[in-house]
Amino acid sequence: MDLVRVGKITRPHGIRGEVVFFLTTDEPEKRLKKGEVLFDKDGAEYTVKGKRNFQSQTLLSLSQIDSREKAEAMRGEELFARAGASSEEEIYFKDLVGLLVESEDGEKIGTVADVIDNPQILLEIKREEGRCLVPWVKEFIKQVDFKSGKITMNLPTGLLSACSY
């Protein structure tokens, strides 16, 4: 089962098991709707009972956490949701590995070897000359075509030689 990170429990809120939840998803309405199942790093399941905003925070109620003590035990825990399959509108980084990378004029740049998910998302591209880290930014990515298995990019002149290792 492929999972995507949804967020992190930062602390308990109140005495009934509600938690303050730091979002890392751009789809909280989809991922945190009532009845959705989330998973911790060990695969334990948590069913969403509710989500609400309080001041600038997201508060989350999970069916398996019904006391402040249980909520406290979850402090710092990251939660994940089922990823599903990538589409033109919704791309999961796991599906980019193995895709061919080409320039807009059809020149082969390399193949995606890995996706490094840090504050700046980077594609590790395996090339004949070695490897290169390329930022995943909309200005560089022109098209992702899963049917043909390729990513079309418009990279600044000199980037490939500057980022190779």
Image: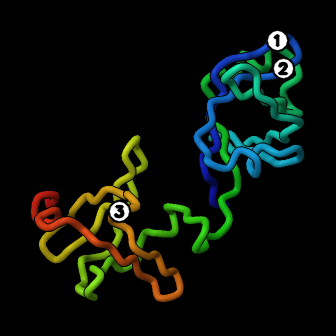
Judging depth in this view, the residue of 42 and 78 nearest the camera is: 78
Name the quadrant containing residue 112: bottom left
Q: CA gap, disc 3 to disc 2? A: 43 Å
Count residues near mark 1 (Cα–Cα under 10 Å), then give few for <14, some for 14-19, many for 20+.
few
Q: Which mark is residue 17?
A: 2
Q: Give the mark, 3 or 1, whose residue is nearer the N terminus.
A: 1
Q: Are marks 3 and 2 in contact (CB under 8 Å)?
A: no
Q: Secondary structure at mark 3?
A: loop
Horizontal side of residue 165 vs 52, given as left or right = left
Above or below — where is 113 with respect to 70? below
Q: Are marks 1 and 2 in contact (CB under 8 Å)?
A: yes
x 84%, y 20%: residue: 17
Measuring from the top left, give residue 147's x and y in whole percent. Answer: 53, 86
Count residues near mark 2 (Cα–Cα under 10 Å), then give few for <14, some for 14-19, many for 20+.
many
Measuring from the top left, give residue 66's x and y in whole percent. Answer: 89, 22
Label 3 amino acid?
Answer: Glu
Q: Which residue is mark 1?
A: 14
Query: How was the colour assigned to the protein in this rendering?
Result: rainbow
x 70%, y 56%: residue: 82
Q: CA gap, disc 1 to disc 2? A: 7 Å
Horizontal side of residue 15 vs 58, given as left or right = right
Name the quadrant containing residue 140: bottom left
Q: Secondary structure at mark 2?
A: loop
Measuring from the top left, give residue 50's x and y in whole percent. Answer: 86, 35
Quadrant where the C terminus sits is bottom left
Label 1 amino acid?
Answer: Gly
Which tag is nearer the camera, tag 3 or tag 1? 3
Label 2 amino acid?
Answer: Gly
Which tag is nearer the camera, tag 1 or tag 2? 1
Q: Which mark is residue 139?
A: 3
